[in-house]
Amino acid sequence: MASLSRALRVAATCPRRSRTRGLGLRALTGQAGPAAEKSVPYRRTLKDPQGPSTVARGPSQPLPSTAHVVVIGGGSLGCQTLYHLAKLGVSGAVLLERERLTSGTTWHTAGLLWQLRPSDVEVELLAHTRRVVSHDLEEETGLHTGWIQNGGLFIASNRQRLDEYKRLMSLGKAYGVESHVLSPAETKALYPLMNVDDLYGTLYVPHDGTMDPAGTCTALTRAAAARGAQVIENCPVTGIRVRTDDFGVRRVAAVETEHGSIQTPCVVNCAGVWASAVGRMAGVKVPLVAMHHAYVVTERIEGIQNMPNVRDHDASVYLRLQGDALSVGGYETNPIFWEEVSDKFAFGLFDLDWDVFTQHIEGAINRVPVLEKTGVKSTVCGPESFTPDHKPLMGEAPELRGFFLGCGFNSAGMMLGGGCGQELAHWIVHGRPEKDMYSYDIRRFHHLLTDHRRWIRERSHESYAKNYSVVFPHDEPLAGRNMRTDPLHEELLARGCFFQERQGWERPGWFTPKGTAPVLRYDYYGAYGNRMHEDHAYGRLLGDEYTFDFPPHHDVIKKECLACRGAAAVFNMSYFGKFYLVGLDARKAADWLFSADVSRPPGSTVYTCMLNHRGGTESDLTVSRLAPGPQASALTPAFEGDGYYLAVGGAVAQHNWSHISTVLQDQKFRCQLIDSSEDLGLISIQGPASRAILQEVLDADLSNEAFPFSTHRLVRAMRLSFVGELGWELHVPKPACVPVYRAVMAAGTKHGLVNAGYRAIDSLSIEKGYRHWHADLRPDDSPLEAGLAFTCKLKSAVPFLGREALEKQRAEGLRRRLVCFTVDEKVPMFGLEAIWRNGQVVGHVRRADFGFAVDKTLAYGYIRDPSGQSVSLDFVKSGDYAVERMGVAHPARAHLKSPFDPDNKRVKGIY
């Protein structure tokens, strides 16, 4: 057998064959179907000697005529979803697999499970997967899933990587995940074959491990079948039948196969690489791409037995223990796209492209030098699906009711499968998952992006290429940029704006005094014949963000914040979602949708939440009551009945739209939801001088008496604040954005008005104690837990979505509570830090930033009582607190009110 070093030499000396054509966006793929017979680790488990082509065709059992749920795809996610549906009591669930279980991409997966990720939700999902494969399935079925607990070792070759691992260690303490930061010498003692000469340290997680895909899926389907579920193999799906109900809503009606149809109201697309094709059958867009992903299996290595699995992120390589050998794989910057996904591909592999794989060999040999003379037993190169943000696609598709997604797992389908299968089952049965799954919800993507080929391809490539990069808090993508820009984009770019990207929108991040920083076209990091950009302004400024310390432009953001506190700042928020809810039943819909009382006189504006039936917060937004009129204008549509204007965060606009649409459909309200996000701009002026500035621009009385807080007038000027200052939002037609902005800037010159971006908003809002949805306020957080009881009309008799859950929670007492902490030491925090109370971990930080007016680090997190009792205000006040950052505990003070302007005088214009 050839050794890894020989493979490296051959790859280096052979002529490089081109893997690109056209504009550098289309990679040649080599073989489109299975390669010649290969020696693969799971062949005896998953592959008959005859091969799938000679297996007798026809379904493995007769199709039922009806089913409560039909799961399409027999890989990890399909089997986990079926299992969890059965556990929830869904007896009429059917799984359809076109070939045999695991035959698509699951069969060749490495099966690694790492418990720590830079996401609290993912830590919870991984914990459930581990529990299922290491305990539950064997107890239920008597079958061994192939779980091996040999531990995991993360390698740090630089200080920032070690800092990232220390952040993971601190988060793990909040969830009871044991981990240890080891020195190079301690690492060598644990893994004697490892080269530690270039290490800063490692993170050792002793309860990580691996699972066998065949054993796991067999046990899952056996347990599901015992509860009444059916698994039907050799049954390709050929179509999804759709019906349109009396209200014009498209709904799933049946699944069609080569062997008959099954009537069902619910389909779950777990088809992996083939999920886009299944989506097209139903008119559903599934934004993912297929790529080759590879590893090699070595010959026997003396002394490797019982060693932990290794992730050397900086070398972009992993080493998985394979008995007395290793599997070696990783993520490269030039992966091969599988352009034409074949529906006949089963238990298949591609030929390994050594030109692409060489970089992983170099990293592996450096880390474990014995590999230089170790033979290669087999190569495994198969297809995997990848998404634009490297997160799975889950939840109900916005285009079709009853059509759920469970796909796009970016090579993590085995380790996330248990947690995601459980959440997907809850989504189907109860209407929403138990945990906060927004980051995985298909509705996170704006509908303009989900079938935009260039955006999907560029972002998916970058997500793949950066899979092992350090996860810095303020990183931004370079791919798929400048997709959606507002009228002020060029104006702000010329003034030094450093832009952030959110759902295709370019929004202001902060303003550099060093000139312009345009975002250049995506260069694919120099892959596929593209020339890599060198030393460009945006790249340099983004590189400054690659730190867990305060960035070099910390003082620039400070100036923006303090200018807002002391004079005024203008914020371009045009990317906000702007909707109209109008019609005969609009008031009924508003009463049901919004937790606050929004049925006030026209001209009023209310801050409110939208909840789910469990009392969790699906959104926070402002709702303005409109006066009806027969004539449409640039600011208001013509409507009869009642009308409301909704302003929501631009990054979550699609989520809001989908939530509202679903509720309107379920309740059969006769009203319209109109999206004017692309038609209107939003310019916000905030600060003590904002009234004086706007008084010069607007021909209106802006006094407290004439224009009270939380009202709107004129060109839809709203007196609102998201930073805790006197201020107004100007909602204007897009053609008027530039002249209005220039007029405001001209009037503000003598008042010290400055441009400011969302980094300033983040700091100012946390300083004032305002919540950010999906940070300190999520779908699994109630307004009562988050300190937003004032947004709930519980004192009235008006029913609203989630009210019963809130009343029950209030009667039983809060099991957790959001608390503000200040840290006197000037240390940066970003979230995920562990919260200690009286020597015990009671939670973790959800959101943190530096407050420049209070001159302290602020952190918000939910705390629990370790005894399981409700968390009272006395419990909060009586504790001795510390916040652990990267393994170091910093004394902290808990606050029941915002430490900045706790009496809310400034928003009322009282200075």
Image: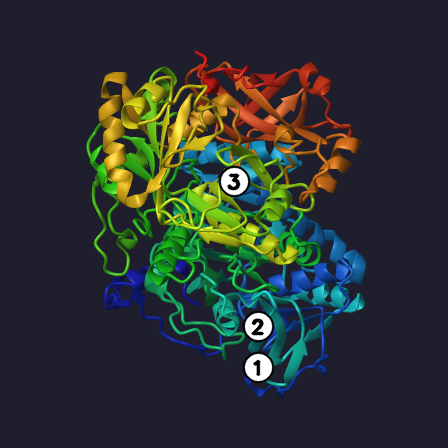
Task: Please name whichever residue, 664 or 61, is drawn nearer the observer in this view of the structure.
Answer: 664
State yes or no: discs 3 and 2 in contact (Cβ < 8 Å).
no
Q: Amino acid at mark 1?
A: Pro
Image position, residue 415 (x, y; %): 59, 54
Q: Residue drawn at (66%, 60%), measured in percent from left and top?
A: 80
Could you give the CA–CA distance between mark 2 and mark 1, rounded to whole angstroms? Answer: 9 Å
Q: Amino acid at mark 2?
A: Ser
How was the colour assigned to the protein in this rendering?
Answer: rainbow
Total numbered labels: 3
Instruction: Judge left or right: residue 767 versus residue 261.
Output: left
Q: Residue drawn at (51%, 42%), measured in percent from left and top?
A: 154
Q: Quadrant of the N terminus?
A: bottom left
Image position, residue 204 (x, y; %): 57, 39
Task: Please name whichever residue, 617 or 375, is drawn nearer the observer in this view of the structure.
Answer: 617
* SS at badge 3: loop
Of callouts 3 and 1, which one flags the residue occurring earlier in the amino acid sequence? Answer: 1
Residue pushed farthest front?
630
Residue that carries the numbered disc 2 in the rendered image:
103
Q: Amino acid at mark 3?
A: Pro
> Residue 671 falls in which quadrant of the image?
bottom right
Image position, residue 424 (x, y; %): 64, 56
Could you give the CA–CA distance between mark 3 and mark 2, rounded to whole angstroms? Answer: 31 Å
Q: Residues within 10 Å of mark 2 (few under 14, many from 20)?
A: many
State yes or no: discs 2 and 1 in contact (Cβ < 8 Å).
yes
Which numbered disc, 3 or 1, marks the residue closer to the eye? 3
Residue 118 disc label: 3
Of callouts 2 and 1, which one flags the residue occurring earlier in the amino acid sequence? Answer: 1
